[in-house]
Image: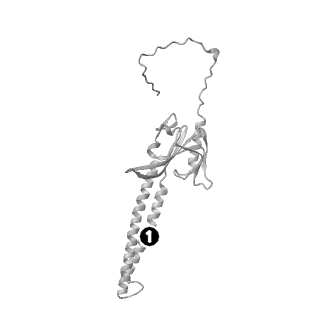
Amino acid sequence: MRSYFHCSTAKFRRRRSVVLVLTGAVCAEAAVTAFIVMFFGLFGTEGARSSTLTRDMLIIAAAFVVAGLAVCFISSAAADRKAARHSRYTYLDIQLKAAVISVYSGEMTILGKNAVFRELYLIPFRDFGSAAPSADGKKLVIRGKLRRYGMESDFLGYHVRGGDIEFDRMWLNVGSYRELDEAEFPPYFGSPARIGAALTEAKKRFDELPKPKKHEFHEAAFIRRRPIRRVLPDDPDFSRTWK
């Protein structure tokens, strides 16, 4: 079973192609119009008025072409940048005890530094309900107890320990999130049915994990011993570390 799904950028590439085709068609129509005006005049008029109208039409056609090329370059660059951001920051990470959905949500310049923002959803499998396509089959609906974080990407780093998710900033493990009972996600990772099946399979795998043994204390079997008195060192300063 796959445990990591990258964002599918086909939608952004498709939008760029549509914009380029439509803009190119407008530019081609303007260029053809300018060619017709240049060689045959406008509506068969002659003389100075015809020259003036021809010149005006050529200027308008040239403006259309320049504007169209500008739109092509800007839209293409914006689409490529957005696709690259989603490809890097939008993903689904399925671990043994929890799953993470990260979604790129924008960026801005703060104090001269470019800051990328994300929405991150933590889905513990112990509180997982279901994952299935929406009624129209275009979105993925996840039910359960989800934690939603929304902040700068640098703050949302985490590591996996024992199959569980632990944030690098410990305060995110206990707060700074919004709890949701349901969340909808566009088809970032391809077929919503396929992603729902992967999450459902991960939930089944979590339920099959062996339960931790509970050690019962029986007082009758406990041997009482006199505690050994420990002598502390003269220097009261000491430190302890837990690993």
Q: In the picture provided, is 49 more to the left or to the right than 143? A: left
Q: Is residue 76 visible?
A: yes
Q: In the picture provided, is 122 more to the left or to the right than 232? A: right
Q: Residues within 10 Å of mark 1 (few under 14, many from 20)?
A: few
Residue tagged 1: 25
Is 93 placed above or below 139 here?
A: above
Is 191 placed above or below 156 here?
A: below
Q: Amino acid at mark 1?
A: Ala
The residue under the point 63% across, 16% down is 219
Which of the two residues, 236 or 182, is positioned nearer the viewer here? 236
The residue under the point 42% across, 60% down is 76
Which of the two residues, 113 or 90, is positioned nearer the viewer here? 113
Q: Position of residue 232 (x, y in %)?
A: 45, 16
Does dot 1 land on a helix, a strand or a loop?
helix
Q: Is residue 1 visible?
A: no
Examine the image and state in which quarter residue 78 appears: bottom left
Tally the numbered discs.
1
Q: Position of residue 188 (x, y in %)?
A: 52, 51
Query: Which color scheme does this rendered protein use?
Result: one colour
Q: Position of residue 101 (x, y in %)?
A: 52, 46
- Say which quadrant the N terminus sits in: top right
The residue under the point 59% across, 29% down is 212
Is 108 placed above or below 175 here?
A: below
Q: Position of residue 6 (x, y in %)?
A: 48, 48
The residue under the point 57% across, 53% down is 139
Q: In this view, which residue lies farthest toward the top?
A: 226
Examine the image and state in which quarter residue 63 appears: bottom left
